[in-house]
Amino acid sequence: MSADRARAAVLGRIRTALGPAPDVPEIPRAYRQAGAVPPDVDRFVERVSDYRATVQASVAAALAARGFARIACAPGLDLELPGVELVRDDPPLSADALQALDGVVTGCAVAVAETGTVVLDASPACGRRALTLIPDYHLCVVRADQIVAGVPDAIAALDAAARAGRPITMISGPSATSDIELERVEGVHGPRTLDVVVVA
């Protein structure tokens, strides 16, 4: 018997054993669309806290509470903080320079109330990806008008950044992972401490 005939015979027996093909159920496609639910700032604050991030009253209060005085800053973020040295990431700071600072402060592109997620899109206010991965502390400033209800709204808001090929980073709480014994370890792939400030 040729290889083709043998293969056909084996597959024929398998089909016989399986019987007729089952009916394929209809796949629901009525997903929630962007704009279907209004944004909820209080829900965002609640969900951010659920992910072990701390919501602070202001940038100055957050840094003062931690005793930080030298902070890297995304190049497009317009901040002035008396008593705090803001080190702009322009030109880009080296990994060693970032590591030597107390942390980093950035803005965000969008924030998701349903999941407590802040999204960075490498715009000037967010900074490059390395800026928020190397320091052990990240302070993210979120404008209230950047908060959207859910993930569909965030995806719609990020369309221009995605089409431009900019990297998009979604952050839900401090960097964390679990080993095979489910022991949580923080700060493995990014900052172990995340503070969020919501401003009007």
Image (cartoon, grey):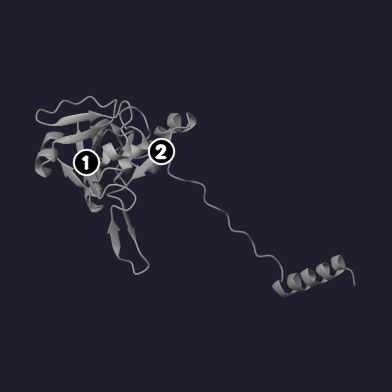
Q: Nearer the viewer, residue 163 or 133?
A: 133
Residue 196 rendering spot, x and y as whole percentages = 21, 41
Q: What residue lies at 44% left-to-right and 32% top-to-bottom? A: 166
Q: Nearer the viewer, residue 167 or 133?
A: 133
Q: Are marks 2 and 1 in contact (CB under 8 Å)?
A: no
Residue where numbered disc 1 is placed: 196
Residue 18 rendering spot, x and y as whole percentages = 70, 72
Three-letter amino acid code at the position of disc 2: Ile
* Numbered marks: total: 2
Residue where numbered disc 2 is placed: 168
Q: CA distance from mark 2 to mark 1?
A: 18 Å
Q: What residue lies at 81% left-to-right and 68% top-to-bottom? A: 7
Residue 107 rendering spot, x and y as whole percentages = 27, 33
Classify 10 Å Cα crowding around label 2: few (below 14), some (14-19), many (20 and above). Answer: some
**Image quarter of the N terminus:** bottom right
Quadrant hosting residue 142? top left
